[in-house]
Image (cartoon, rainbow, N blue to C red):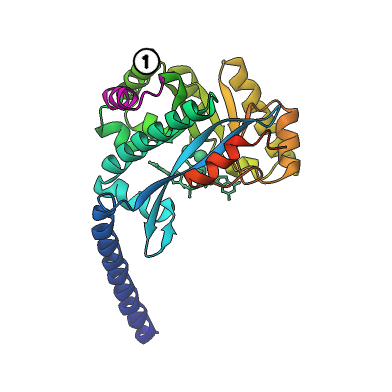
Amino acid sequence: AKQSGQGKHRFFKRSMNEEANKRLAMLGSLRTALQNNEITVHYQPKVITAHKTIMGMEALVRWRRNGGLASPADFIPLAEDTGLIVPIGRFVLEESCRQTQHWRTASGKDVKVAVNVSPRQFREDDMPLLVREVLDKTGLPPGALELEITESVLMQNPEQSRITLQDLRAMGVTTSLDDFGAGYSSLSYLRRFPIDVLKIDKSFVDDVPDERQANMLVRAIVEMAHGLNIQVVAEGVETKDQLDFLHKIETDYIQGYYFSKPLPPEEFEALLHEGPLV
Ligand code: C2E
Ligand code: CA
Ligand code: CA
Ligand code: CA
């Protein structure tokens, strides 16, 4: 037993080293990725539930790496730990505002872009100043920009966050609370912070309309949000049954593979020119 225990330990140690080496190698290439134009942005439509037209899109970062596309799940945590998320986040903000303003003027459609802001970026960057600079530079009107933050941002630094969110609201930029329901004690945040939109976490959306408890929860979230003058997006919608349920309970917007995966800009542009996404 001792023998195999030691073997396991050695194996564990070796795989930990391999893991650390992999992280180090990835960190090196992530550092140069921005300069090498390997960081790009994809766009996923947000659809108005009632008539299936595109009201805007979420900007989602991608890394063109070794001929493929690395998923943010693989490099965002590393970027967050090392602080690289700050320059990456600035790039995504500026690139997506520039692209959105281009689409608005080219298509005449009043679309809005939502950009994810990580806890570290929210904490370390002067967000109101950065946003002001990017809006000035790209010409995007403030009302066409939404920032998506998570509860952890609010938990880590409530007082500073409240001030930052108020400054952004005064500027005309909206804020949405992402992954709503996946974390803790979300309800008090809705009263304490100026939040415009809730995004119901995919884990709830996955279970409607087949699980009664999920149905009740989602319905309650929508009702409560509307009572507080907050709009609701359901994320991760994949089926017609989910869509029908979410429509019935008056969820404002739908995002998910049912309509479209996140797309590279050329493909998103083609989608934008089509009519309603039936
Ligand atoms: P998120 O902000 O919750 O984004 C939604 C994720 O769900 C995206 O994954 C999207 O592609 C995926 N998704 C959308 N609809 C569906 C669906 O119907 N089914 C399924 N299975 N998935 C769906 P993605 O693009 O891999 O991003 C993962 C996470 O990485 C994001 O979760 C966000 O937390 C983070 N992230 C992405 N882009 C950025 C960024 O520019 N900055 C920061 N700080 N984080 C980002
Ligand atoms: Ca998001
Ligand atoms: Ca989300
Ligand atoms: Ca999520």
Q: Residue at x 65, y 22 (%)?
A: 223
In this figure, which residue is indicated by the disc labeled 1?
Answer: 171
Work out whether residue 183 can be spotted. no
Percent x, y for residue 116? 42, 37
275 left or right of 156?
right
164 left or right of 62?
left
Magenta residue check for 204? no
* Snapshot quadrant of residue 276: top right
Say whether mark 1 is within 8 Å of ligand 1.
Answer: no
Query: At label 1, which amino acid type do we have?
Result: Met
Q: Residue at x 27, y 40 (%)?
A: 86
- Quadrant where the image shows the C terminus: top right
Percent x, y for residue 45? 57, 37
Number of marks: 1
Percent x, y for residue 111? 52, 27
Q: Is residue 104 above or below residue 2?
A: above
- For mark 1, does the 10 Å Cα neighbourhood hold few (<14), some (14 to 19), or many (20 or more) residues? some
Front one among 17 and 261: 261
* Snapshot quadrant of residue 47: top right
Q: Secondary structure at mark 1?
A: helix
Q: Residue at x 76, y 42 (%)?
A: 241
Q: Is residue 240 above or below residue 144?
A: below
**Secondary structure mostly seen in the magenta stretch:** helix
Front one among 270 and 170: 270
| Residues drawn in magenta | 128-141
The single residue placed furthest to the top in the displayed view is: 170
Magenta residue check for 134? yes
Front one among 3 and 98: 98
Percent x, y for residue 1? 40, 84
The single residue placed furthest to the bottom in the displayed view is: 3
Work out whether residue 2 can be spotted. yes
Q: Residue at x 37, y 78 (%)?
A: 8
